[in-house]
Amino acid sequence: MNFRQMADQIGFSEEEFLELVGLFLESSLSELDHINTAVDEMDFKKMAMSAHSIRGAAVNLGFAEIHELAKTIEGNAGANELNGTVEAAEKIKDNLEQIVGTMVLTGRD
Amino acid sequence: MKNAYPILVVEDDPVTRRLLEKILQEAGCSEIRVAVNGRDALEILKHSFYPIVITDWIMPEMDGLQLCHAIRHDDLPGYIYIIVLTVKDSKSDIVRGLEAGADEYLVKPINPSELLVRLKTAQRILELEKSLKMTNEEIRTLSIQDPLTGIFNRVYLMERLPQEIKRSHRYGHPLSIIMCDIDHFKDINDEFGHKAGDQILKEFVHCLNAAIRQDIDWVARYGGEEFLIVLPETDLQPACLVGERLRRVVSEKVFRLKGKDIRITSSFGVSSFNPAKDQRTTFDVLMEQADEFLYEAKREGRNRVKGQNVKDKLFELKGESYEEEITSRR
């Protein structure tokens, strides 16, 4: 994960990009909590909304895998299905932790 | 890119919101405001006008497409150029977005260069709208204004007076009109030429305008040297006093034409109606009566005011001073 390269792709400095990543982590972790609660409550609308929010932010910053996982959750929720949702949410969490790890390594946490 | 138009960003995701703000700020956008959903945006648009709206589609409470519909159905002070910016990327999504009233449909991830070039298009459209509006206003002004005197013309009179009459009926308030005419105007034209005649007309109109209530009463040129003054919320007697005051002002004024001082006189026909007493007065009746009294004032020797309520007794002024009443009315 090369933050400088990702920043270049959207025409931002690394500093500005990391500020956005910080915001992304904060909002995505919160949305992930909402997804987990929505799974327990079988609230597909809430599930779709939170997955959509993660998806939009992820695609804009270039986190392609998170975007795809969130898209799966959103699609499932749209079809009132849970098949694969919990796993996708877990994987999103792993990805977010990986981003945190990279930030720690680069001294940006 | 210098964008002079304020932009409203409607986005529930804080990351995208911040990203958009940064892109727009760096592009030199003058004013950027953010809303977190469609409802929030509509609330903002109720109080402040944003000619460019960049909106997400999927949002809680009110989504971007519902916002597009609402904007297109609302009576707003100008055109709003709407850009939908979403992750929904199928052809049918794009069609739905544009059908909802969006001018532009962009798919995330945001490409700053693409967004800015689309904003340039927005600017071009808004500039065109502005110039079209200005041209329309100019045409409208030209179509209702008398080019010589600058007051309203007959076209405007025929359009506006019936509205004034309707309003009087609706609210039960009186209305008066004064038809006036410069006496022996043809002689001025014959002796001094048409240019001098035009000067008299302009100065005459100046006298009329100076004696009426600003933003309430109004004057229109009815024909060559014939004018109509409309006095809303005014009964016959005060209207006749206004006529009398005008008659006196005009008769006392010295006009300088080709090195010669000359004086003119004018005649006035006043017609009034009070909806409380008469529900049937129409534009034609009011105009005919004012014309009739103007004619009578002329026939009786000119330089006088004749007036009457519709279906009422004759009210006549022969030049007495009504300064006190007129002052209290103005």
Image: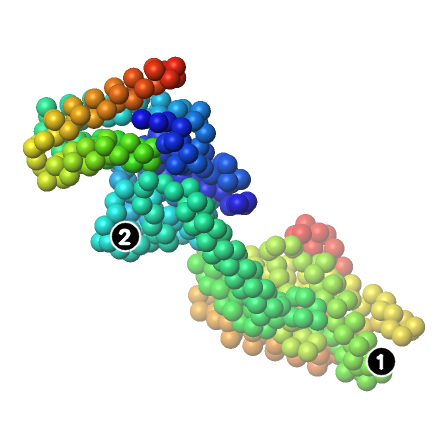
Question: What secondary structure is found at the residue carrying circle 1?
Answer: helix
Disc 1 designates what residue?
B192
Q: Nearer the viewer, residue B228 or B196?
A: B196
- The reply, left or right, for residue B11 in relation to residue A34 is right
Q: Amino acid at mark 1?
A: Phe
Disc 2 designates what residue?
B94
Of the image marks 2 and 1, the number of the one nearer the N terminus: 2
Q: Nearer the viewer, residue B4 or B208?
A: B4
Residue B162 seen by the camera: yes
In the image, is residue B147 above or below residue B110?
below
Q: Closer to the camera: disc 2 or disc 1?
A: 2
Q: Amino acid at mark 2?
A: Ile
Q: What percent of the width, then of the height, locates residue A18?
A: 39, 24
How would you rate the neighbour count of disc 1 (Cα within 10 Å): few for under 14, some for 14-19, many for 20 or more?
some
Question: What secondary structure is found at the residue carrying circle 2?
Answer: helix
In the image, is residue A109 above or below residue B130?
above
- The reply, left or right, for residue B82 in relation to residue A74 is right
Residue depicted at 90% across the width and 71% down the height: B261
Structure colour scheme? rainbow
Q: What chain does badge 2 belong to?
A: B
The image quarter in which residue A96 lies: top left
Callout count: 2
The image quarter in which residue B153 lies: bottom right
Q: What chain does badge 1 belong to?
A: B
In the image, is residue B190 above or below residue A7?
below
Q: What percent of the width, then of the height, locates residue B249?
A: 78, 63
Q: Nearer the viewer, residue B230 or B308?
A: B230
Q: Outermost residue toward the right?
A: B259
Residue depicted at 43% across the width and 27% down the height: A14
